Each structure stands twice: as C-alpha cells, then as structure tokens.
Image (cartoon, grey):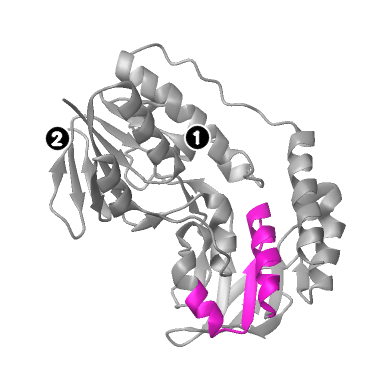
Amino acid sequence: MNKLCILGAGVGGLSLAEQMMKEGDWEITLIDEREYTFSRKEIFPLLVGEKREVTYLKDLAKQKGIEFINAKVEKINFNKRKISFKQAKSINFSNLVICCGLKSKDLSIKGSWRKGFLSLSHLDPLLVRKFLKISYDIIVYVSTFLGVKLAFYLSLLKKNIKVVADNLSFLGRYKERVEEFLQRQGIDVYSGTRIEEVIGNSTVKATKVSLPKVFSSQLVFMDSGFIPCHDFLGENLAKEGFLTNYEGVYLLGDVINKDVGNQHFFFFNEEEVVVQSKVLARFINNQQPISYTKRVYEEEEINGRIERFLEEWKVKLK
C-alpha cells in the first residue's frame, strides 16, 4: 500500500485525502496542530456563537480509516524524509503534500505579544468567543475584506468596537457603503490610521494609534493581510506549481499562491483549492501531466460577492 502524509487539515488537505482514497489504495496520515477544522467561511459566525459545522479531526480520521497526528511540526528534513514535532515522536514519510495555507503579515507592532492581540491566521473561534464574553472594548484593524466581515459579525454582540485602517480604498465603490453600515451599527471607523502599540501588562489594556489617540481595549483583532505559510519550506523547495525539487513532495493551496500578499478578497480560495486537490490527486495516482491554470476572477465577479454579502446583512439586521 502506498503511503502519503498530508500536512494541513483545512479544506485542501481534507479534499485531497478524500480524492486520494477514491482514486487509489493509500495509507494516509493527516497532520495538524488543531484538534478541529471548519470551512474558513464559517470562522466569524463561529466566533460570535452561531451554530456552524465543526469537524473534529480525531473523529473524522477514525471514521475514514486514516491516521491523525495532532501536533505542531517543528522541522522537516526533506533529504532524510523525516518530520519532527514539538511534542510528538518524529515520523518518516514516503510522499508528502504540504498545504499549510496562509499566515498573517507581521507588522511588527510593539506589544503584540500580549494576550488579547489576535492575528486572523491563528484565530481559534471556539476559544476566542469565551474571551469575547468578558470583553467590551474591541479594536479591529482592517486591511482586507476579511477584517470588514469580522467587524460586521462583531457588531451583533453590542460591544464597543472601533475599526482602524490604514487605507480602505481596496473597497472601491463600496467604501462609503461599508463605512456607513458600520457607523449605523455604532462602530467608529478610523481610516488613514495605524496601530502603533498595544499597551498592558500580560494582557491587552489599551491600543495606541497614529492619530495620536489611545483607546481602551481588551481585544485587538489584527487583519494585516496574508502571505503563504513557508515556515517549513527551504528556499530551494518549490519548483513549479504543485511540484518541488524533491520527488514525492508536493505543495497545495494558498501556500503556492504567489499573489496572495496583494489580495484583499478571499471569496474564491476554498473553491480553488478543491479544484487543485482533484488535479493533484490524479497526478499522484496516475502520474498524468498536471493540467491546471489558476483562474483569474474578474472585478465584476468580486463585486457580485460583495453586493451579495451586503444584501444578506441588510436582511440579517432587520
């Protein structure tokens, strides 16, 4: 039986595992430091307490007959084909697919180590919503549409929320509509502003912005934009697309999205990675040539999704 390790149990990793089992005889090991996963579209509904589907990976692995390692990867030695973990026994691999997605850009904000400063790429909605219950003053830094969506959902909680953004021009013709909506929900919007420092002891107590002003805050949500998560990848790993310079080692999803640092809208990423997983599964199983071109979405398609989102919220708040 062929063996495959999949690093990352998001939509891409789970879709690939499903496809591999359909198309061949594989012994699959799924690796993720999280105990559960969900569609990224559900992260903010989950955060504010709405009921959404959550997949517990240990249960899923048992159901599918695959192995699940719930541990954080410390290092990958591609020459020795070995994965080392921080709190688990090292394993060897024959074939490996890395689909560890995105991580938030580091804006090097003073005091960002304090508890209560939350980057979107590491947001655990089931954990953070417990802190939301005991917090009232919240800052949301926005640089993509994900930060906008977060502010919309947080508005349901009737907290004291302030949106801080260096520039909201990425919203184009929707900028004024979004700002007006947030203000109607009692959210102050500070555009042309940056977070300079997070103040407190071990936890966040206040946030200093470039106005200059200091706002009381117990939580700071940081939507700083995203870059591919290359934490485990050497400079010479990537070759082209899904392929690497190591036989049997592949990349999948946003980890190969070179343009993601300039992306402001993430409406289609999950759809794209499902398509990618099918293409890669066929290649690994049959060694068929990879036939895949990343789709370029037109401005009107993106605007259509924004329009739909705003219309849904008009109904939601009636």
- Name which residue lies at 32% across and 39% down: 234
Cβ–Cβ under 8 Å for marks 1 and 2: no
- Name which residue lies at 34% across and 25% down: 22
Task: Sort mark 2 into few (<14), some (14-19) or many (20+) by Cα contacts within 10 Å.
Answer: few
Could you say where residue 49 lies in the image, as x and y percent from the top left?
56, 69
Question: Label 2, on which residue?
Answer: 80
Left or right of 174? Residue 59 is: left
- The quadrant in which residue 163 appears is bottom right
Work out whether 94 lies above or below 312.
above
Q: Where the N terminus falls, by quadrant?
A: top left
Q: Secondary structure at mark 1?
A: helix
- The quadrant in which residue 166 appears is bottom right
In 3D space, how far apart are the residues under numbered discs 1 and 2 (Cα atoms)?
29 Å
Which of pointers 1 and 2 lies earlier in the amino acid sequence?
2
Amino acid under disc 2: Lys
Residue 111 in view (yes/no): no
